[in-house]
Amino acid sequence: MKLNIQDIAVIVPARLGSNRVKAKNLRLLNGHPLISYILRTLKTTKNLKNIYLNSDSEIFQRIADEEGVKFYNRRPELGTSEASIDDLIYDFIQTVKPAHVAFVCPTSPFMDAAQLDRAWEQYVSEDCDSLLSCERIQTHCFVEGKPLNFSTEGKHPRSQDLVPVHALNFAVSIWDAAKFAVNYETNGHGVYTGKLGFFETEGWAGIDIDYPDDFELAEMIARFLSSEDKPEANYPDYVEALFADGREIAN
């Protein structure tokens, strides 16, 4: 059982370059750099306060100083698009030597502190070696033209009866650092180390910014969340009349 939360180090990765969105981590989202959202959220958690902004560019040193977190200057070769998440986490583990390491992506700006704390608590209670965040998808899925979680031999199944599919989003991932390092040194990789656990993110936390269109959607969400004027659910008059009559509308 893992009990000492002081031994967990949190990596927030940030490359200066980006293949799909120019200077993505520094682009303003509702007036604030994208990277600042997750840093500020992490600082409000109960368990994930040992934060390292991990980057190949010293530009992020300024942001780390402004946000009051540590800066880890990774080697230049770990800042390219060819470098893997396995490589940069192993490098970090070898230098910082934490007991547990969390990897929290800045491209999930709407991840909240409560979910981050629940992820750590699940990691501890399940006693897993790797905890990977995911989105629970309960719909009809195909892989290479073949049904994944249902059969096409028969009537169309209801979505609520399907086996859910877990799609990884890497909003937050947590590992046993020693086991990660051993797996990396033995097999050349570490993300899928030992006993795997899956943390299901909820709500806006599943929003991941990878493309320009994602940024446009995130901008609208950020403005909505920061607005004090939230719209209420409204219906046409004839539907409101049904509600007024006390008619139950359910399937």
Image (tube, helix red, strand yellow):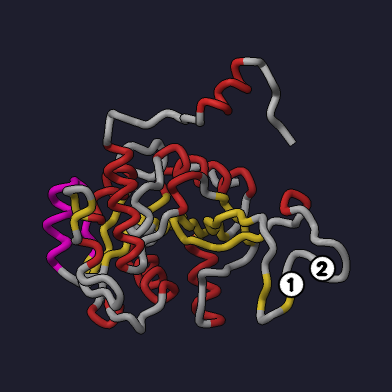
In the image, taking residue 15 as reference, residue 200 lies left or right, namely right
Task: Give the Cα distance between marks 1 and 2.
Answer: 6 Å
Give how far across and how far down residue 7 sits, in percent.
42, 49
Give how far across and how far down residue 152 sits, in percent.
81, 70
Q: Residues within 10 Å of mark 2 (few under 14, many from 20)?
A: few
Q: How many marks?
A: 2
**Segment colored magenta:** 58-72
Residue on which the image places disc 1: 147
* Three-letter code for the amino acid on which mark 1 is drawn: Pro
CB under 8 Å between discs 1 and 2: yes
Residue 99 makes an appearance in the image: no
* Residue at the outermost top position: 245
Residue 198 makes an appearance in the image: yes
> At numbered mark 2, what does the secondary structure look like: helix, strand or loop?
loop
In the image, taking residue 197 as reference, residue 4 lies left or right, namely left
In depth, the one of 235 and 208 nearer the eye is 235
Residue 231 figure quarter = top left
* Three-letter code for the amino acid on which mark 2 is drawn: Ser
Image point (36%, 72%), residue name: 88
> At numbered mark 1, what does the secondary structure look like: helix, strand or loop?
strand
In depth, the one of 93 and 246 nearer the eye is 246
Q: Is residue 74 magenta?
A: no
Image point (38%, 55%), residue name: 108
In the image, taking residue 164 as reference, residue 27 lies left or right, namely left
The numbered dot on residue 247 is none
Give how far across and how far down residue 221 sits, in percent.
34, 47
The numbered dot on residue 151 is 2
Give how far across and how far down residue 126 sits, in percent.
64, 48
Residue 170 vertical placement versus 56 (above, below): above
Q: Is residue 63 magenta?
A: yes
